[in-house]
Image: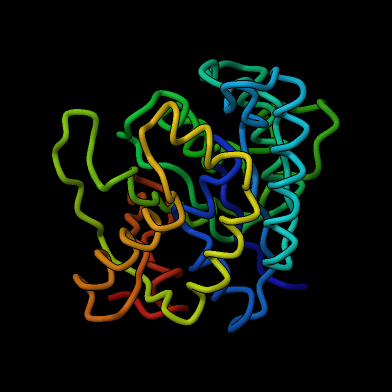
């Protein structure tokens, strides 16, 4: 059975911005199985389409992007700007972890520009800790508890800075030069977001923005393109850098 890498991020296209290059290397070089999960379908991500319509479009874009990776897309069906740490939402994440059974989980930085990202990070952290505990959500029809806490990693915050504009250094970087073309193709699958990001964020050429950030992390690492990560190292979480060992931390 293949090992599994799961990215749990807030919205469709977050994985393509933040960690798809490293996930692709695990798939192509190490034979891992990949799952991309989002907390929401991106229902607020449009200036001219209603929430149901844009959600249908963005779920399809997420699935298409994951297919390019050879992976599987999941949506936990929370709603944009309403991702919260509460029992029903946490149970959804724990259920996903027990079904997918990841060895590596990648989520958002604990401190990022918007609360959906930060709440997703907290939910991933809690689910990683709780999913191996048999009595946690007992008798809810879940798959069996995990055998152990998965390795938990935080991707870079957007633009590499916290909400106060302070730079957030990566704990280590992964060279994604070999998978940058695939990362770009996956991001381009999210075609609905170009007009939205231009209107709301003032960001045109969002693929170029991804490439520029990958190049910036690459320059820090001595390669053409890279993604930055930090590992959660709190008590009882694995402290061996599995991602870094598999792909060559820089």
x, y (%) of residue 228?
A: 33, 60
Query: Foreground: 86 or 109?
Result: 109
Whether residue 167 sits left or right of residue 133 in the image: it is left
Please give the count of numbered marks on the rendered protein. 0
Whether residue 77 sits left or right of residue 108 in the image: it is right
Whether residue 106 sits left or right of residue 248 in the image: it is right
Whether residue 139 sits left or right of residue 242 in the image: it is right
Colour pattern of the rendering: rainbow
Query: Foreground: 118 or 176?
Result: 176
- Quarter residue 121 falls in: top left
Image: 116 above or below 207 = above
Quadrant housing the C terminus: bottom left
Residue depicted at x 77% and y 73%:
1
Image: 51 above or below 232 = above
Give the farthest residue toward the left: 166
x, y (%) of residue 193?
A: 56, 39
Give the farthest residue toward the right: 141
Residue depicted at x 56% and y 55%:
187
Image: 50 above or below 213 = above
Image: 37 above or below 54 = below
- Quarter residue 172 falls in: bottom left
x, y (%) of residue 163?
A: 24, 29
Query: Foreground: 222 or 104?
Result: 222
Residue depicted at x 54% and y 76%:
25
x, y (%) of residue 206?
A: 44, 49
């Amino acid at each position: 059975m293949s090992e599994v890498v799961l990215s749990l991020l807030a919205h469709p296209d977050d994985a393509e911005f933040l960690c798809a290059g490293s996930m692709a290397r695990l798939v192509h070089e190490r034979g891992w199985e990949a799952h991309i999960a989002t907390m929401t379908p991106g229902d607020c991500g449009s200036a001219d389409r209603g929430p149901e319509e844009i959600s249908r479009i963005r779920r399809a874009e997420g699935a298409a992007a994951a297919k390019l990776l050879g992976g599987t897309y999941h949506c936990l069906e929370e709603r944009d700007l309403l991702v919260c740490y509460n029992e029903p939402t946490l149970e959804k994440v724990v259920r996903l972890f027990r079904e997918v059974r990841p060895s590596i989980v990648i989520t958002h930085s604990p401190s990022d520009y918007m609360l959906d990202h930060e709440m997703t990070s907290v939910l991933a952290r809690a689910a990683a800790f709780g999913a191996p505990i048999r009595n946690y959500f007992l008798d809810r029809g879940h798959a069996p508890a995990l055998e152990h806490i998965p390795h938990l990693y935080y991707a870079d915050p957007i633009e590499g800075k916290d909400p106060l504009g302070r730079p957030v250094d990566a704990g280590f970087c992964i060279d994604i030069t070999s998978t940058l073309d695939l990362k770009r193709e996956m991001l381009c699958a999210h075609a609905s977001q170009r007009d939205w990001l231009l209107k709301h964020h003032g960001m045109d050429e969002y693929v170029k923005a991804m490439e520029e950030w990958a190049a910036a992390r690459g320059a820090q690492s001595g390669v053409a393109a890279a993604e930055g990560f930090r590992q959660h190292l709190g008590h009882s979480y694995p402290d061996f850098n599995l991602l870094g060992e598999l792909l060559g931390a820089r």
